Image (spheres, helix red, strand yellow):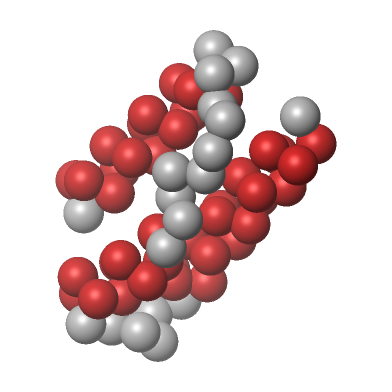
């Protein structure tokens, strides 16, 4: 879980620095589900929404 949180922190810094050019969270929810073997946990939906939001941000900028 620490790795996933670190990925989010790096993403946040890239957004703040206006240095985000690709979505480093591609497959983020799948990685979580595979790591914990928990595909039905509600957090996977949240993580999927974060990934889509990053895609939307990149599309707008």
* Quadrant location of the N terminus in the rendered image: bottom left
Going by the picture, which residue comes out furthest to the bottom?
40
Is residue 16 visible in the rendered image? The answer is no
Going by the picture, which residue comes out furthest to the front?
21
Residue 60 picture location, percent across and down: 80, 36
Q: Residue at x 44, y 71 (%)?
A: 44
Residue 54 picture location, percent across and down: 61, 45
Q: Nearer the viewer, residue 17 or 45?
A: 17
Q: Residue at x 46, y 56 (%)?
A: 26
Q: Residue at x 54, y 19 (%)?
A: 19
Quadrant in which residue 40 is drawn:
bottom left
Residue 16 picture location, percent across and down: 56, 17
Eyeballing the image, is 6 above or below 40? above
Number of disc labels: 0
Eyeballing the image, is 45 above or below 25? below
Residue 32 picture location, percent across and down: 30, 66
Q: Is 6 left or right of 49, judged from the image as shown?
A: left
Q: Is 10 left or right of 56, judged from the image as shown?
A: left
Quadrant in which residue 22 is drawn:
top right
Is residue 55 visible in the rendered image? The answer is yes
Q: Residue at x 33, y 40 (%)?
A: 7
Going by the picture, which residue comes out furthest to the top?
17
Eyeballing the image, is 8 above or below 20? below
Q: Is 50 left or right of 7, judged from the image as shown?
A: right
Quadrant in which residue 61 is drawn:
top right
């Amino acid at each position: 879980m620490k790795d996933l949180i670190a990925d989010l922190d790096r993403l946040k810094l890239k957004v703040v620095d206006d240095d985000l050019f690709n979505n480093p969270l591609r497959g983020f929810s799948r990685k979580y589900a595979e790591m914990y073997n928990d595909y039905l946990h509600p957090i996977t939906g949240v993580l999927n929404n974060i990934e889509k939001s990053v895609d939307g941000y990149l599309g707008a900028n």
